[in-house]
Amino acid sequence: MQVSVHAAKTNLSRLLEAVERGERVVIARHGVPAAELVPVQASVIKFGSLKGKLKPPPDEFLAPMSEEELDDWGA
């Protein structure tokens, strides 16, 4: 389905329902497609999934910076 920007503003809730049902909704400006409404892909975040895959930072990573390094950062 293709709708104008005005129709999209007026009927946003209905258009979202259409997308949720699997319909393709294109918003056009002056008859030229400008955007497409698509459903959000649900992402699953599993805490701890990187356990054992990353190494801890080296000791010097947490060490205070030298005066020269601080100057380089403009601190």
Image (cartoon, rainbow, N blue to C red):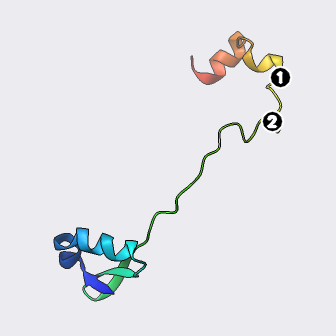
Vertical comparison of 28 with 57: above or below: below
Q: Give the CA distance from mark 2 to mark 1.
A: 12 Å
Vertical comparison of 35 with 54: above or below: below
**Residue in front for this viewpoint, 60 or 69:** 60
Could you say which quadrant of the image residue 72 lies in?
top right
Going by the picture, which residue comes out furthest to the front?
21
Coordinates of residue 17 in the picture (x, y in percent): 31, 72
Q: Residue at x 59, y 51 (%)?
A: 44
Q: What residue did someone put label 1 on?
A: 58
Q: Which quarter shows the N terminus?
A: bottom left
Please rate how many residues cluster around mark 2, counting C-alpha atoms within 10 Å: few if below 14, some from 14 to 19, many from 20. few
Callout 1 secondary element: loop
- Left or right? Give the position of 38 relative to 66: left
Q: Residue at x 19, y 78 (%)?
A: 7
**Residue in front for this viewpoint, 74 or 36:** 36
Q: Residue at x 83, y 35 (%)?
A: 52
The type of residue carrying mark 2 is Leu
**Residue in front for this viewpoint, 44 or 57:** 44
Callout 2 secondary element: loop
- Left or right? Give the position of 59 relative to 20: right
**Residue in front for this viewpoint, 20 or 9:** 20
Could you say which quadrant of the image residue 59 lies in?
top right
- Per the rendering, the mark at residue 75 is none
Coordinates of residue 14 in the picture (x, y in percent): 25, 73
Q: Which quarter shows the C terminus?
A: top right
Coordinates of residue 54 in the picture (x, y in percent): 80, 35
Q: What residue did someone put label 2 on?
A: 54
- Left or right? Give the position of 23 relative to 3: right
